[in-house]
Amino acid sequence: MIILSFSQTLKKDSPVLNSNTYVFGFAFAVTIIVALMLSGAATILKPFQEQNFLKEKQENILSVVGKTATDDYKKFNTYIKSVVIDEHGNELTGVDAFDINLAYDKKLHTKDSTYTLRYPLYIFEEGGKKTFILQLAGVGLWGPIWGYLALDEDGNTVKKAVFDHKGETPGLGAEINTDGFEGQFRNRKIFDDSGSFVSVQVTKEAKSDDDPHKVDAISGGTITSTGVSNMLREDIKFYLTYINKSKKV
């Protein structure tokens, strides 16, 4: 408004108005004002964005244990115990599970192997039985992929899995967050008959419907499917020490 009022006081044929100095100065002032407005809007909206992000995470976590009512996220702490663990299966104190950016932590660890990885773990208990909810983070064809996997208290049986992505191709890699793909994981096993960890493999190889360790890859989404398979193997393995300790308690 100040700049506009000032410009209106100048005559159209004014040397000042037609000078390069005025043009660049006016453009610079407008740029600064717009930047301040955008910065202010971002600051004001940030708490709402963080609240929505938290709500979305809570709803995803609850969804893998069958809590889908719209108001269940408000009771999250009633249903779920949240912990953060290290690679030795120890609970870390003073760290909130929701403060962990798993994808970022894994990226730091890749660049510096001395960086201590921390994984958020969520535990749901009902009817005297526990369900371990594992958080997953990986890379697809076009960017980050992530998900949550509910593991039965036997530490072996997958109860449910949900996945999502940032920018996979619709109809191809983006199919990882469809019921058709996610539904395949129900009752799959992460250990073979000899007790060896094999994870759940996303494969294009022919398999029988009762194969307990494999699910069908997405047709035309090979790289994204491989990303999901790698993510499962890497992240599930990290949680096993803690889960095995819990089973002995």
Image: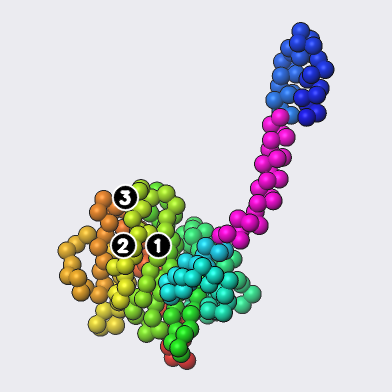
Q: Which mark is residue 70?
A: none
Q: Is residue 138 above or below residue 118?
A: above
Q: Secondary structure at mark 1?
A: strand
Q: Main secondary structure of the magenta part?
A: helix
Would you say residue 239 is visible in this rendering?
no
The spot of residue 195 in percent (x, y) is: 29, 83
The span shown in magenta is 30-53
| For marks 2 and 1 on the same chain, the one whose residue lies earlier in the sequence | 1
Picture disc at residue 181: 2
> Is 106 on the left or on the right of 187, as rendered?
right
Local SS, label 2: helix
Residue sitting at 38 percent across and 50 percent down?
168
| Discs 2, 1 touching: Cβ within 8 Å | yes
Q: Of helix, strand and loop, which one carries label 3?
A: loop
On the image, the x and y values in percent for residue 235 come to 41, 69
Residue behind mark 1: 163
Residue 221 x, y percent position in the rendering: 29, 52
Which residue lies under the disc numbered 3? 171
